[in-house]
Amino acid sequence: MGAMRGYGDDLAYIHDAAFSDYGRNTTPGLLRMLRRNGITDGLVVDLGCGSGRWAGDLNQRGYAVVGVDQSPAFIRLARKIAPQSKFVLASLLRVELPACDAVTSVGECLNYCFDRKTGNRELARLFVRVYRALRPGGVFIFDVAEPARVPEDGPRRTWFQGADWAVLVETAGDRSRKALTRRIICFRKTGRRYRRSEEIHRLRLYSADEVVEMLRRAGFRAECLRGYGRFRLPAGIVAFVAKK
């Protein structure tokens, strides 16, 4: 799969306005997981930080944060929403990781094909780099989309709308090829008119077993989860807690 761009100004705005509840719902469980592993402060690196809502929550509880995203629009939003954090515009697979106490990546960020090279080999290399960046006792908490994320009954269309925006999402894919595609058409109000923009997102899907094996080879002790605390993940998404 080739590289692509994603989350331009309009979709980044809509994502924060309409879908940041997903991140907020994961926050209590994520915080408990950090504390349960003895990480009550220190540096958290968030891969796929989006608009910085999770970074802001971490800052409020005394953590330092470095957020990473490939979207300039998300980085601009994040710097306003979580000004105490540091944000880096970079590839999630290639960013230089600082020494840290935890790494997070919530919302199937690691599935997106925003790099020229993506897939098992690149993901395995990232896991090795995360392991090396973590201090002893550090944790890597993240989720990925599995092949079950592909709709069984063919392409699916979903419509969402708010006060000054609307979005149509068409989801299709091939479970056998572990590929998912989302065509996203955005309408955002500017003055008295609506501006239309379109993005196509391609995701490489991974089974839980292959992710656990990659984590094990990197040196982690890994556990699969179907939610963050009381928050249950949508069908086709699995979370992991990997300990150094």
Image (cartoon, grey):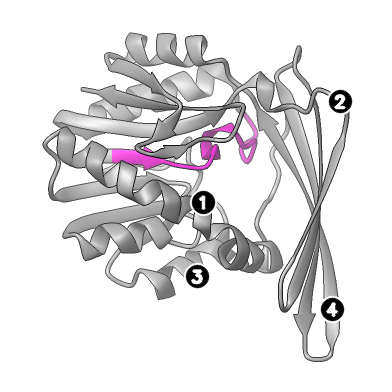
Q: The residue tagged with tag 3: helix, strand or loop?
A: helix
Per the image, the residue denoted by label 3 is 76
The region drawn magenta spans 103-117
Please give the name of the residue rendered at 67% of the width and 52% of the height, measured from the top-left corner.
6
Where, by quadrant of the figure, is residue 59 drawn?
bottom left
Task: Quickly name the residue at label 4.
Answer: 194
Mark toward the start of the polypeptide (2 vs 3): 3
Q: Are marks 2 and 1 in contact (CB under 8 Å)?
A: no
Q: Nearer the viewer, mark 1 or mark 4?
A: 1
Q: Nearer the viewer, mark 3 or mark 4?
A: 4
- Looking at numbered disc 3 in the image, what kind of residue is underneath it? Arg
Image mark for residue 22: 1
CA gap, disc 2 to disc 3?
38 Å
Q: Residue at x 74, y 27 (%)?
A: 150
How packed is label 4: few (under 14 Cα within 10 Å), some, or many (20 or more)? some
Tag 3–tag 4 contact (CB < 8 Å): no
The amino acid beneath tag 1 is Tyr
Q: Quickly name the residue at label 2.
A: 153
Element type at marker 2? loop
Helix, strand or loop at disc 1? Answer: helix
Return the residue nearer the eye: 114 or 227.
227
Cα separation, mark 4 vs mark 2, equals: 32 Å
Going 31% across and 54% down the picture, which residue do you hit? 66
Distance in Å between CA atoms under marks 1 and 4: 26 Å
